[in-house]
Amino acid sequence: MENDELVSMLSQHTAPTPPMSFQAAVSVLETFNEQVSALLPFEQRRRITPEIESATLAFLTYQFTPLRIDFENAFPKAFEAAGRVMQQASEATRHRFLSEVVLNCVHPDDVKRFSKMVRHTLRPDQVNATLRQHAAVGNDLHLYNSFWLLHYMNVTDEVILAIAAQLVRNPSANPHVREAATATLRLAAGTNL
C-alpha cells in the first residue's frame, strides 16, 4: 500500500476525540490500577465507575487509533487497568470500544490484540450487527479491521464472507488483505485454488 493510500485510509477513521486528555486518562487508569490490583475481581468490579470507563476509552483511543499521541511509551500500568475495566465494563462501553477503538485501529496487530477481548465481552450477534453496519458504509479502514477481527476470532459466517467479498472487489485494497480475503472465500467455498 502506498503512503498516500495509507493516509487516505487512516483519514477515514471515525474515532471521536475523547473529552478527556490523554495524560488525564493515563493518570486515572494508573491510579485505578494501584487501588485495585490487590483486590479480588468482584471487589474490582465495584470500583469501576463511568469516569473509569470513560478514561479507559480515551486511553485506548489515544493509543491505538490515528489519534495516537504518544508513540514512545507503552504505559503498561494504564494498559493493564484498561484490560481490567473492559472485562467488567458496561455493555454500552464495550460496544463503543468495538466501534470507536477496534474498528479504527491503525494496525492489524492491534486488532489481533483486542480480538480475544471482543470475543469474551460482546455477544456474537452484537459483533455481527456492528460489523454489518460499518461494512455497509464502505469505510476502508472499518472493512480492513472488520475482516481482521473476524479472522483472528476464527469466524467463518456470512459476515466475514460479505466483508471478504467487498475487499476482493475493491481495486484499491491492500494486496495482502485482498489475498487473505480471497483465501477466506476459497476456504468457505471448499476449494484450495
Image (spheres, grey):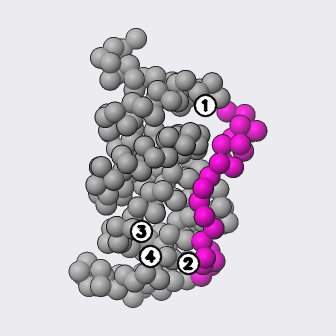
Say if 136 sits above or below 56 in the image: above
Judging by the rendered image, the residue that carries numbered circle 3 is: 93
Judging by the rendered image, the residue that carries numbered circle 2 is: 25
Which residue appears farthest toward the top when viewing the image?
193
Of mark 1 and mark 4, the one earlier in the sequence is 4
Closer to us: mark 3 or mark 1?
3
Of mark 3 and mark 2, the one earlier in the sequence is 2
Give percent across and percent down for residue 164. 45, 30
Q: Amino acid at mark 3?
A: Thr
Judging by the rendered image, the residue that carries numbered circle 4 is: 53
Closer to us: mark 3 or mark 2?
3
Residue span colored magenta: 1-24
Would residue 93 be found to the left or right of residue 122 on screen?
right
**Spatial CA span between label 4 and label 2:** 10 Å
Q: Kindly check if marks 4 and 3 are in contact, taking CB atoms under 8 A apart as contact.
A: yes
Helix, strand or loop status at disc 1 = loop
Q: Tell me if residue 77 can be seen.
A: no
Out of 60 and 79, give the one closest to the viewer: 60
**Spatial CA span between label 4 and label 3:** 7 Å
Q: Kindly check if marks 3 and 2 are in contact, taking CB atoms under 8 A apart as contact.
A: no
Q: Amino acid at mark 1?
A: Asn
- Reply yes or no: does residue 180 show up in magenta: no
Judging by the rendered image, the residue that carries numbered circle 1 is: 174
Give percent across and percent down for residue 4. 76, 38
Out of 7 and 138, give the one closest to the viewer: 138
For image coordinates 58% across by 43% down, the residue present is 139
